[in-house]
Image: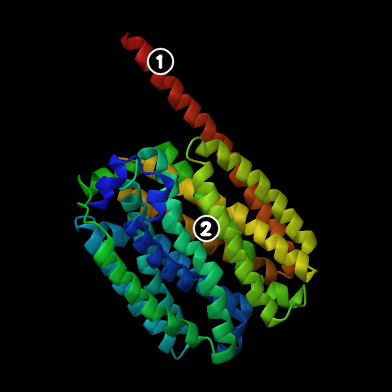
Amino acid sequence: MESLRLNSEGGSTRDLLTSKPLVALAVAAFGIGTSEYIIMGLLPNLSHDFHVSIPKAGALVTGYALSVTFGSPLVAIATARLERKFTMLLLMGIFILGNLCCAIAPTYNLLFAARVLTALCHGAFFGIGSVVASNIVPRNQRAQAIALMFSGLTLANVLGVPAGTALGQVFGWRAPFWSIVPIGFIAAAAIFFFLPTQPPASGSLLHEFRVLRNPQVLLVLAISTLASSSLFCVFTYIAPTLLSVAHASPHAVTLTLLFFGLGITIGNLAGGALSDRQPASFLVVAFIALIGSLIGLYFAEPYVVPAIGMILVWGAIHFAAGSPLQSRIVDKAAEAPNLASTLNQGAFNFGNAIGATVGGMLLTAGFGYRQLPIASAVIAALVLALCYTAIRLDRRHRDERIAEKISTI
């Protein structure tokens, strides 16, 4: 099996990049990422077609995120005793069905319901996929393996979202969802042929839920939630912001989404490579830089070219922290990796919902699009404080282990 080969050979970076199981996971992540993020570029189209406001159209983001948050753990529990490869094929079936329903939805409410259905596969897929990716590499390359899986998610923002946005502007918002359906079938085939079988999680479901008593696990979930809130407070409304503040053309919006995708792809891979040794310290540095990039975005927004450049930088810095967080929770919840990893995906998406809601509330209250990066920077400052707390917990845990070893001598 390829998983055994990677572990026995030490798992070089070249092995990771050519690993067929990781490629299969990345292809599926590409489809799921395109489906999730495409809605941002289509908000103006959806608002016009269904005769709803931009904040109400933004509720499609909130609904998707809440479905991931509360539905994915239930899916993970329901599939906990199934073989992991079979589970991931089942989740891709839900993904295909959900996007098909989105493409044919005749009303806003039915589109909302279809998005909720699609989201059910999201958190469980990335949660279980993170465990699968971690199991086929040595421990010191977990963050890189997870980053490579998530590279499909970030590449979706480079290729899938800009292409889907352009497709939606020319042929209507339904066209991108139709185009996602065959991607789902390709991803399912890649999983079927390339992903090795892995046993289901061991132990009882009650045992898995006990992981929530671990303060380090809860801290990761809190950081993931607030980090995504910071991102989506701005990103949900990036298209109308560019159109109304920078007076950008629809073509420039598509170009911006492309650059954002490039930024988050670079950041995701760099974060995975740089954070394997000192993940907690890396997170502190990343969120300090994130606050600076959001302040820069505030000043750059009225100008098209500087705004596009800052969006690229902002996206790169933000996604550099994603893989370390996912790797950290797999490490801190080793006794219940499936549930904890899925809960972390739920935390990310709960943050998406909070961020989209906070942004919508600010806009409804009369604040402008330019104030959203400032609100996002405030949230990022809270994340920074939690990262410092994580470092203190790590040091305390390390000191306790040293004391235990000394006491046994």
Amino acid type shown at disc 1: Ala
The residue lying furthest to the top in this view is 409
- Disc 1 secondary structure class: helix
Camera-side residue of 277 and 333: 277
> Which mark, residue 351?
2
- Disc 2 secondary structure class: helix
Where is residue 195 shown, x and y percent of the image? 27, 60
Residue drawn where x is 25% and y is 67% of the image: 192
- Crowdedness near tag 2: few (<14), some (14–19) or many (≥20) residues, C-alpha within 10 Å: many
> Which mark, residue 287?
none
Camera-side residue of 59 and 38: 38
Where is residue 199 shown, x and y percent of the image? 19, 51
Evaluate whether residue 349 shows in this view: yes
Residue drawn where x is 54% and y is 48% of the image: 271
Please determine whether, in this image, residue 37 is positioned above or below residue 354. below
Residue drawn where x is 36% and y is 75% of the image: 184
- Crowdedness near tag 1: few (<14), some (14–19) or many (≥20) residues, C-alpha within 10 Å: few
Evaluate whether residue 386 shows in this view: no
Please give the residue where the numbered disc 1 appears in the rendered image. Answer: 403
User: Which label lies toward us, 2 or 1?
Assistant: 1
Please determine whether, in this image, residue 325 is positioned above or below residue 197. above
Identify the image's colour scheme: rainbow, by chain, secondary structure or one colour: rainbow
Amino acid type shown at disc 2: Gly
